C-alpha cells in the first residue's frame, strides 16, 4: 500500500474516521493495529522482525533506566544496538560483503563458493531500526525516561506514516505525542490535507514523470553524450527530491490530520550554497541522526586532534551514510564524495562572524543565485553516482559529461529540456516563494485565491499528466 | 555566577562575538556559528579554560548550556 494508491486512501479514510471518535488510549490501539495491517499488506512475514526490535528495545529501555550500575546500563544498551544492527546488517548487507570478499579472494587466486542469502529486504528496516535505537540511546544518555506501556512503544516503532521511509523521528519527540491526548481539530485537518495534496503532486506529477526521463538516460548503453547525461541527472535530481520530499510531506500531512507533529525532513535543499547547508536541508532526520549518534561520539572522543577530529568523524559518518542508502559501491562512493566536499568546506570555511556578515549582505543578490546554481551542479555530480547502475557506468558517464558534451543537432536534448521544465516549473515557483518568505508553509498561509488557483492547476496536472497509479517511492528500497 | 561568566567568555572567544550572553536555556540554535564542527572546538576550549575533563557520556547528555554549566560546576567544586 503506497501512499499514492487507492487502497491506501481507503485505508486511511477508514482509520481516520474511527480515530476521530475514539478516546486517547483507544486511538493508540487503533493506530497500532492499523500500522500492523499497513505493514502486513506489504509483507506479513517481516512483522516478526518488527516485533523482535520492539520487544528488545522496550525491555532494554526499562533495564537501562532502572539499573544504577553503569556497566549494566552499557550492557543493555549494547544488546539493543547489536540486535537492531545485526538484523539490519544481515538482511541488507550480507550479500554485499560476501560478494566483495569472494571477489577479493578471486583476485588472490582463491576460488570460493559462498552461500548468497536469498531474502527480500524488509520494508522500512533501515528506518525503523534507526528510529528504535534513538529510544535506548537517549535513555542511556539520560535524555528521556522509558515508557511502561508496551503498546505505546510498539506504536512508536510501527507508526504507519513513518514506517516505510521515515522521517526518522526520535523517541523523545514522538513518544510524548503518543503518550498525551491529541487534539485533531479543523486547523490540523486543513494543514494536513494541504501537505498530503502537495506531497501527492510532487510524487505523481513531478517525480514519476521525471523518472521516465531519468530511466531512459540511465538505462541506455554507452557511449554517452554529456548533454544527455546532464539532462538525465537534472531529471533524477528533481525526481529523487520530489519522490522523497513528497513522501515526507504526505507522512507529515497524515500525522497532522491526526494531531501529530511529525518532523520536517527537507528544507529547500537545492537552495544550499555549501555542503553543510545542504545536509542541514536534505533528509534532515537522517543527517541529524548520524550527527548525534555517530559524528559527535567519534569527533568528541578524538577532540584532542583539533580540526582533524571533525575531519575523521565526517569521513566515517558520511561513508556509512552512503552505505546506509544501499549495499552497493555507488552509494559508498556517493557518501565519500560528500565526505570530501564537507572536509574541504571544514578546512576553508570562513569564521562564524565573517559568515554572518556575508550572509546578511548577499541574501538576495545575483551572486547568491549564481552560487545556488553552481552548488547545484556539485550536488548533481553526487547524484550521478547515486543513480548509476554500476561504478563503471558512473565513470563512463563522467567521461561523457566532461569530454563528450554535444549540444548541437540534438533533438532529444530539446525534448528533454522542455519536459523537465514543464514538470518542475510549478515546484520551482513554489519553492522560490517559500525561500523569499523563509517559510515552508508560505503558500498555505497565502490568500485564498492564490491557493485555489494552485490547487486547481495542480489537480488538473495530476489528472491529465500524472504518471500512473501507485508507483513505488524510491526510498522504499532503502 | 563566576562559572557562568567564565563560560560566557569562552563562548565569546570561540565564536568571535562579544555580544553573546548565554543563559541556561541557550542551545546551538541560539548562537550563530555554533555547529557540529565548532562544537568540538568549544568543548576543548571549555576543558582547557576550566581545567576539567568531560566523560564521553557527559558530553553526549548535554541538552543546553544549563546542563553544561551544571557539569562544569560539579567538576570544579570536586
Image: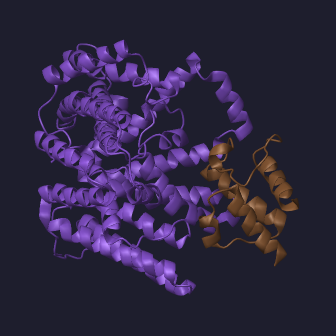
| Left or right side of A63 for A418 | left
| Chain letter tied to purple | A
Question: Farthest residue toward the right?
Answer: B2
* Residue A101 in view in this figure: no
Report how many numbered discs are placed on residues in the image: 0
The residue lying toward the viewer, choosing from A84 and A396, is: A84
- Identified at 81% across, 52% down, the residue is B8
- Identified at 33% across, 45% down, the residue is A255
User: Height in image: A413 above or below A9?
Assistant: above
- Identified at 47% across, 60% down, the residue is A172
The colour with which the image depicts chain B is brown
- Identified at 27% across, 20% down, the residue is A455
Instruction: Provide residue A461's location: percent of width, then percent of height.
Output: 20, 20
User: Height in image: A288 above or below A36?
Assistant: above
Colour approach in the figure = by chain
| Left or right side of A224 for A72 | right
The residue lying toward the viewer, choosing from A58 and A267, is: A58
Instruction: Provide residue B24's location: percent of width, then percent of height.
Output: 72, 55
| Left or right side of A97 for A273 | right
Amino acid at each position: 500500500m503506497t501512499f499514492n494508491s487507492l487502497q491506501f486512501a481507503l485505508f486511511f479514510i477508514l482509520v481516520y474516521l474511527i480515530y476521530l471518535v475514539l478516546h486517547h488510549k483507544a486511538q493508540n490501539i487503533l493506530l497500532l493495529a492499523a500500522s500492523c495491517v499497513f505493514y502486513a499488506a506489504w509483507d506479513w512475514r517481516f512483522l516478526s522482525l518488527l516485533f523482535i526490535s520492539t520487544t528488545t528495545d522496550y525491555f532494554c529501555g526499562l533495564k537501562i533506566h532502572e539499573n544504577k550500575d553503569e556497566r549494566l546500563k552499557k550492557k543493555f544498551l549494547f544488546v539493543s544496538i547489536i540486535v537492531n544492527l545485526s538484523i539490519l546488517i544481515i538482511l541488507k548487507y550480507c550479500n554485499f560483503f560476501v560478494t566483495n570478499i569472494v571477489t577479493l579472494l578471486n583476485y588472490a587466486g582463491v576460488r570460493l563458493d559462498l552461500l548468497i542469502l536469498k531474502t527480500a529486504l524488509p520494508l522500512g528496516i533501515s528506518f525503523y531500526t534507526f528510529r528504535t535505537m534513538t529510544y535506548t540511546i537517549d535513555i542511556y544518555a539520560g535524555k528521556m525516561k522509558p515508557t511502561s506501556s508496551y503498546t505505546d512503544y510498539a506504536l512508536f516503532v510501527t507508526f504507519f506514516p513513518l514506517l516505510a521511509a521515515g522521517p526518522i523521528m526520535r523517541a523523545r519527540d514522538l513518544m510524548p505525542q503518543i503518550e498525551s491526548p491529541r487534539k485533531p481539530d479543523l486547523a490540523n485537518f486543513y494543514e494536513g490535507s494541504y501537505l498530503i495534496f502537495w506531497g501527492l503532486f510532487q510524487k505523481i506529477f513531478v517525480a514519476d514523470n521525471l523518472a521516465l526521463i531519468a530511466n531512459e538516460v540511465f538505462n541506455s548503453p554507452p557511449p554517452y553524450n554529456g548533454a544527455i547525461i546532464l539532462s538525465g541527472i537534472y531529471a533524477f535530481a528533481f525526481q529523487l527530491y520530489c519522490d522523497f520530499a513528497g513522501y515526507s510531506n504526505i507522512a507529515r500531512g497524515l500525522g497532522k490530520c491526526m494531531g501529530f507533529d511529525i518532523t520536517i525532513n527537507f528544507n529547500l535543499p537545492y537552495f544550499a550554497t555549501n555542503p553543510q547547508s545542504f545536509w542541514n536541508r536534505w533528509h534532515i532526520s537522517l543527517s541529524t541522526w548520524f550527527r548525534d549518534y555517530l559524528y559527535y561520539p567519534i569527533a568528541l572522543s578524538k577532540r584532542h586532534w583539533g580540526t582533524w577530529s571533525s575531519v575523521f568523524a565526517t569521513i566515517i559518518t558520511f561513508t556509512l551514510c552512503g552505505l546506509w542508502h544501499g549495499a552497493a559501491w555507488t552509494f559508498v562512493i556517493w557518501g565519500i564524495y560528500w565526505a570530501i566536499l564537507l572536509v574541504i568546506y571544514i578546512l576553508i570555511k570562513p569564521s562564524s562572524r565573517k559568515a554572518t556578515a556575508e550572509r546578511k549582505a548577499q541574501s538576495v543578490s545575483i551572486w547568491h543565485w549564481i552560487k545556488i546554481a553552481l552548488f547545484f551542479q556539485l550536488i548533481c555530480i553526487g547524484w550521478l553516482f547515486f543513480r548509476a547502475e554500476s561504478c563503471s557506468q558512473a565513470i563512463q558517464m563522467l567521461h561523457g559529461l566532461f569530454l563528450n558534451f554535444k549540444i548541437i543537432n540534438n533533438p532529444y536534448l530539446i525534448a528533454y529540456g522542455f519536459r523537465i521544465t514543464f514538470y518542475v516549473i510549478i515546484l520551482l515557483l513554489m519553492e522560490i516563494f517559500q525561500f523569499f518568505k523563509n517559510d515552508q508553509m508560505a503558500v498555505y498561509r497565502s490568500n485564498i485565491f492564490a491557493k485555489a488557483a494552485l490547487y486547481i492547476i495542480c489537480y488538473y496536472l495530476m489528472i491529465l499528466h500524472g504518471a500512473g497509479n501507485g508507483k513505488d517511492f524510491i526510498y522504499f528500497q532503502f | 555566577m563566576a562559572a557562568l561568566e567564565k563560560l560566557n567568555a569562552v563562548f565569546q572567544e570561540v565564536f568571535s562575538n562579544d555580544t553573546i550572553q548565554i543563559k541556561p536555556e541557550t542551545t546551538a540554535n541560539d548562537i550563530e556559528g555554533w555547529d557540529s564542527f565548532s562544537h568540538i572546538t568549544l568543548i576543548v576550549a571549555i576543558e582547557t579554560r576550566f581545567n576539567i575533563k568531560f566523560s564521553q557520556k557527559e558530553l553526549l547528555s548535554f541538552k543546553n548550556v544549563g546542563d553544561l554549566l551544571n557539569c562544569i560546576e560539579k567538576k570544579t567544586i570536586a
